[in-house]
Image: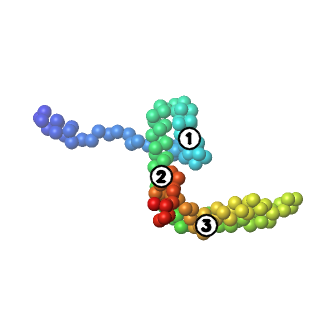
Amino acid sequence: MGDETRESASSEVIARPRNTFPTKWLDEIEAMILRAEAPADFVPALAKQWQRTPRQVWRYVAKVRARLVERAKAHDPDADRELVRALLLNAYRTAEVGTADKGPDAKGMVAAAKTLADVTGAAAPKKVDVTSGGASIKLFLPDET
């Protein structure tokens, strides 16, 4: 009989609570990350506020980061590119109209046009020297050798 109880006890699964993350806290951490706050700055304060260890709050941060990565995978870069293009065109038009007292904003128009050219690839590529490693380049003509 002792063997039967031993076998049935080993086949049972120990019931443990699931690792649940409080969505309210995850949303708060996500808002902080999206405001470009550094987790190293806010984790100790949240640990005290929520009466958790900093290690547990860092687990929440990791969960939020994973959630943001999954969301980023769903974005279409072409749609983002078109959104940026539309925003830059709007910025150019706004700078072109300007304000009633100062008129058009020439610097704003130039900045928007330059950024739009960079985003769309209309700007000429910059020449980069990859062969000299940053040292000055000397040209030798055939008659100088």
Amino acid bearing label 2: Gly
Quadrant hosting residue 42:
top right
Amino acid bearing label 3: Ala
- Give the crowd class for mark 1: few <14, some 14-19, many >=20 residues within 10 Å: few
Q: CA distance from mark 2 to mark 3?
A: 25 Å
Q: Residue at x 48, y 41 (%)?
A: 60
- Regarding mark 3 in the picture, which secondary structure is present there? loop
Q: Earlier in the sequence, mark 1 or mark 3?
A: 1
Q: Residue at x 16, y 35 (%)?
A: 6
Q: Which residue lies under the disc numbered 2?
A: 133
Compared across the picture, whether 117 is left or right of 66 comes to right
Relative image position of residue 131 (x, y in whole percent): 46, 57
- Give the crowd class for mark 3: few <14, some 14-19, many >=20 residues within 10 Å: few
- Regarding mark 1 in the picture, which secondary structure is present there? loop
Query: Is any atom of residue 91 visible in this view?
Result: no
Q: Earlier in the sequence, mark 2 or mark 1?
A: 1
Amino acid bearing label 1: Ala
Relative image position of residue 59 (x, y in whole percent): 45, 40
Please say if 1 is above or below 30: above
* Circles 2 and 1 in contact, beta carbons < 8 Å: no
Q: Which residue lies under the disc numbered 3?
A: 123
Q: Residue at x 60, y 69 (%)?
A: 122
Q: Which residue lies under the disc numbered 1?
A: 38
Q: CA distance from mark 1 to mark 3?
A: 35 Å
- Regarding mark 2 in the picture, which secondary structure is present there? loop
Relative image position of residue 101 (x, y in whole percent): 88, 59
Q: CA distance from mark 2 to mark 1?
A: 36 Å
State how many labels appear.
3
- Give the crowd class for mark 2: few <14, some 14-19, many >=20 residues within 10 Å: few
Q: Residue at x 16, y 39 (%)?
A: 7
Pick the residue in front: 45 or 86: 86
Q: Assign the C terminus to one quadrant of the image.
A: bottom left
